[in-house]
């Protein structure tokens, strides 16, 4: 058989024209995978990326930062949110009570303070509750809780200081003086101790000694507006209206969200402009 040497086999086509198409297809798949959620939910590829859920710890940190800025109302909201997310966190409740006291709402401080004690009845939670009860006018309840705080930790200067304040409000001067002297011995560098020392002395008519204690308390913690309010009250008792006004102005600057400083400032300003009132306050 003769072979036809003119036969030529079918020429294979080059694969090069297909390569760009494959690259284009791969690019489309890559874009779908990285720029959308197509492969997670192919029926709705354009769902937005979910916002990460905030933790109680993040709200506590935010609250501390806001407190440092003296934005007490905003700090209170952050503590409330932290307590919602972590209802067994006694700190979140105790700090709410502390802020409510500073804002001039001790009646609103009682609830979160009680919740803090219910979670953990340590000395700090107990004396905070006692303080809230005292400032809300519930003196008998306050004494019971303050005594529990002292029993819980006899070395807590703040517990003795709060008990002294309650005894003073009940008119028991001797017990108040005993407790505040114990508090000072335990920790003379506590702003709460020094403020309550001034409070006890001022209510016993020892106004000049009280003013020295208030000044020391303000050095230790200049952010506590109620220190200046009580100092202003002492100045009024001495008939020192201009200095009382200065103290109340400091209270407003330290706690601008509280109406207490503004009310006291208005009262002192009115007295300063009333000659009859000034005559009645002279030594």
Image (cartoon, grey):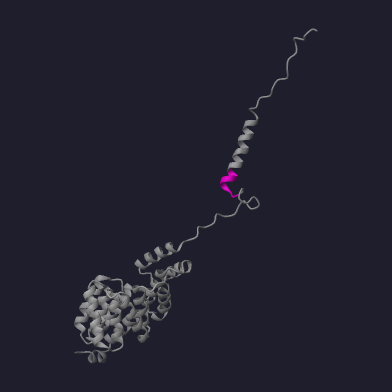
Q: Which SS type dominates the magenta stretch?
A: helix
**Residue 193 point in image, percent of width and height:** 26, 76
On the question of residue 235 being in view, the answer is: no
User: Magenta residues?
Assistant: 31-37
- Judge from the rendering whether residue 98 lies leftward or rightward of residue 160; answer left or right: right
In the rendered structure, does residue 32 fall within the stretch colored magenta? Answer: yes
Q: Position of residue 80 (x, y in %)?
A: 45, 70
Q: Quadrant of the C terminus?
A: bottom left
Q: Taking the image as drawn, is residue 77 in sight?
A: yes
The answer to whether residue 176 is above or below residue 5 is below
Indicate the quadrant containing the N terminus: top left, top right, bottom left or bottom right.
top right
Residue found at the very far front of the displayed protein: 151
In the image, is 89 to the left or to the right of 265? right
Q: Is 13 drawn above or below residue 27 in the view shown?
A: above
Does residue 138 belong to the magenta stretch? no
Q: Residue at x 60, y 38 (%)?
A: 26
Determine the residue positioned at 26% across, 77% down.
195
Q: Is 117 on the left-hand or right-hand side of 201?
A: right
Residue pictured at 60% horizontal, 35% vertical: 23
Count of numbered badges drawn on the protein: 0
Q: Is residue 276 above or below residue 244?
A: below
Position of residue 25 measured from the top left corner of the image (x, y, whole percent):
63, 38
- Looking at this view, name the residue that lies furthest to the top: 2
Q: Residue at horizontal 38%, vertical 74%?
A: 121
């Amino acid at each position: 058989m003769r072979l036809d040497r003119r036969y030529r086999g079918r020429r294979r086509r080059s694969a090069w024209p297909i390569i760009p198409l494959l690259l284009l297809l791969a690019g489309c798949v890559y874009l779908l995978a990285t720029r959308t959620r197509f492969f997670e939910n192919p029926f709705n590829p354009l769902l937005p990326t979910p916002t990460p859920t905030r933790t109680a710890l993040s709200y506590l940190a935010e609250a501390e930062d806001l407190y440092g800025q003296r934005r007490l109302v905003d700090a209170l909201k952050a503590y409330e949110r932290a307590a919602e997310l972590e209802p067994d966190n006694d700190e979140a409740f105790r700090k709410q009570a502390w802020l409510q006291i500073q804002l001039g709402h001790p009646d609103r401080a009682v609830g979160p303070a009680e919740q803090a004690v219910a979670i953990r009845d340590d000395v700090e939670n107990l004396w905070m509750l006692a303080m809230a009860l005292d400032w809300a006018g519930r003196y008998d309840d306050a004494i019971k809780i303050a005594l529990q705080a002292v029993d819980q930790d006899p070395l807590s200067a703040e517990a003795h200081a709060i008990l002294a304040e309650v005894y003073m409000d009940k008119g028991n001067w001797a017990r108040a003086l005993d407790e505040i002297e114990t508090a000072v011995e335990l920790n003379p560098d506590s702003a709460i101790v020094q403020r309550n020392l001034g409070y006890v002395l001022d209510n016993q008519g020892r106004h000049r000694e009280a003013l020295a204690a208030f000044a020391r308390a303000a050095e230790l913690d200049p952010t506590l507006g109620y220190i200046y309010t009580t100092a202003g009250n002492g100045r009024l008792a001495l008939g020192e209206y201009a200095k009382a006004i200065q103290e109340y102005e400091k209270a407003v600057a330290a706690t601008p969200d509280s109406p207490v400083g503004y009310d006291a400032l208005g009262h002192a300003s009115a007295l300063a402009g009333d000659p009859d009132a000034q005559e009645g306050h002279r030594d």
